Image: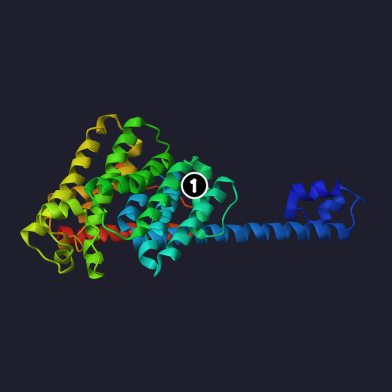
């Protein structure tokens, strides 16, 4: 009886109140022990909350630094899915940066095995300790994310450790489907969208996104004397790897870029054909298509894409923020709330500078 009262009222119940309620049934020693246990439990809960805030902040900073387009889009997700969106994008960033961050292929493969094991732990409901893994575990529990999509991303990134150019455009599209499209399927699940038309759109948008990502990375890879563009398109126009490494702007290089970018545009057009049947709730998963459209319609010179001003992206985001009211910053963690508000204010300043 003594312990049930203590568990019910916790440390809010004073020692005097307990003695008054149950005269002669409790001793000061029992109360002291019970109160000590309850205080330790509260301290553990406080420590857990601190860890949770740290994990979320870690994912926010990782995505902001490594996937800024995705970071902006995540901020515009509904509150119920925003944290999960950042967790999924952080997971994608962790996998994407393995290839360029290791000196030996074996080390990269070991990291991929770590992530495969982590996914298995997550679906056994065994919460991992790594920040991104913990946030991903929460997302899986909250939204019932499909395990197959997560494993497919890892498997495809693992195959990409071969460090060779794509043999043809179809191989690049397959890679994009298995990585970028899989991520979009997961984002749709986090938004609660289960719609075949949305899935078809996500498939094509993911392929377009993967193609554009490959193009955007050309200057970086060329600086490291590596070229991953589809070999069949390069051979068609007589463009060698050395042409890209030297940063050539000859017509044959421009033709290669144009053909590859045009294929991304084809996928965007296919995705657009499903727009009438895609629910509005799927929109946050597809915001990056605005950026892809800007890249295709502008100057196709790949070496100009690195410094491309993305103010049109900010314009769209701010329009949604003001008109649709998608951002409702009611986060319990005041520090994270202030941080996200700061990012929104930064977007407004960038938009103002570009309007002048």
Asked whether, in this view, residue 19 is left or right of residue 277, the answer is right
Density class for disc 1 (Cα within 10 Å; few <14, some 14-19, many ≥20) is many
Q: Quadrant of residue 243?
A: bottom left
Furthest toward the left, the residue is: 251
Quadrant showing the C terminus: bottom left
Q: Position of residue 353 (x, y in %)?
A: 19, 62
Between 77 and 127, the residue placed more toward the observer is 127
Q: How is the image coloured?
A: rainbow
Check the image and report above or below for 44 versus 139: below
Asked whether, in this view, residue 248 is left or right of residue 307, the answer is left
The residue sitting at 41% across, 49% down in the picture is: 85
Furthest toward the top, the residue is: 277
The residue sitting at 29% across, 37% down in the picture is: 201
**Residue 271 visible in the current orientation:** yes
Q: Position of residue 188 (x, y in %)?
A: 39, 40
**Residue 326 visible in the current orientation:** no
Q: Position of residue 177 (x, y in %)?
A: 32, 44
Quadrant showing the N terminus: top right
In the picture of the structure, the residue carrying the numbered disc 1 is 139
Asked whether, in this view, residue 161 is left or right of residue 10, the answer is left
Between 308 and 328, the residue placed more toward the observer is 308
Check the image and report above or below for 211 versus 276: below
Q: Quadrant of residue 52?
A: bottom right
Element type where label 1 sits in the image: helix
The residue sitting at 30% across, 61% down in the picture is: 346
Q: Position of residue 13 (x, y in %)?
A: 76, 53
């Amino acid at each position: 009886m003594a312990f049930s009262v203590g568990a019910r009222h916790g440390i809010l119940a004073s020692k005097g109140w307990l003695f008054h309620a149950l005269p002669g049934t409790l001793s000061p020693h029992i109360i002291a022990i019970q109160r000590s246990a309850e205080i330790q439990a509260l301290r553990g809960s406080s420590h857990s909350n601190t860890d949770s805030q740290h994990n979320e902040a870690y994912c926010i900073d990782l995505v902001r630094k490594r996937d800024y387009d995705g970071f902006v889009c995540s901020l515009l997700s509904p509150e119920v899915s925003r944290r999960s969106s950042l967790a999924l994008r952080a997971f994608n960033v962790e996998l994407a940066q393995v290839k360029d961050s290791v000196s030996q292929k074996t080390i990269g493969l070991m990291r991929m095995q770590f992530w495969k094991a982590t996914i298995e732990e997550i679906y056994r409901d065994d919460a991992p300790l790594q920040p991104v893994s913990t946030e991903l575990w929460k997302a899986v529990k909250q939204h019932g994310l499909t395990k197959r999509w997560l494993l497919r991303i890892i498997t495809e990134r693992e195959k990409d450790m071969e460090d060779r150019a794509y043999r043809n455009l179809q191989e690049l599209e397959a890679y994009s489907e298995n990585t970028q499209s899989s991520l979009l399927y997961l984002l749709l699940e986090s938004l609660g969208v289960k719609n075949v038309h949305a899935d078809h759109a996500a498939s094509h948008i993911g392929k377009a996104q993967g193609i554009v990502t490959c193009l955007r990375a050309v200057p970086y890879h060329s600086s490291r004397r590596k070229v991953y563009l589809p070999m069949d398109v390069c051979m068609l126009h007589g463009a060698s790897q050395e042409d890209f490494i030297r940063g050539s702007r000859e017509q044959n290089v421009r033709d290669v870029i144009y053909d590859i970018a045009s294929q991304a545009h084809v996928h965007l057009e296919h995705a657009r054909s499903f727009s009438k049947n895609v629910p509005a709730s799927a929109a946050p998963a597809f915001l990056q298509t605005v950026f892809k459209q800007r890249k295709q319609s502008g100057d196709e010179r790949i070496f100009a894409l690195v410094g491309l001003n993305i103010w049109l992206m900010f314009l769209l985001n701010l329009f949604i923020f003001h008109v649709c009211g998608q951002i409702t910053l009611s986060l319990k963690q005041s520090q994270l709330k202030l941080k996200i508000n700061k990012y929104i204010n930064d977007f407004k300043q960038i938009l103002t500078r570009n309007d002048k």
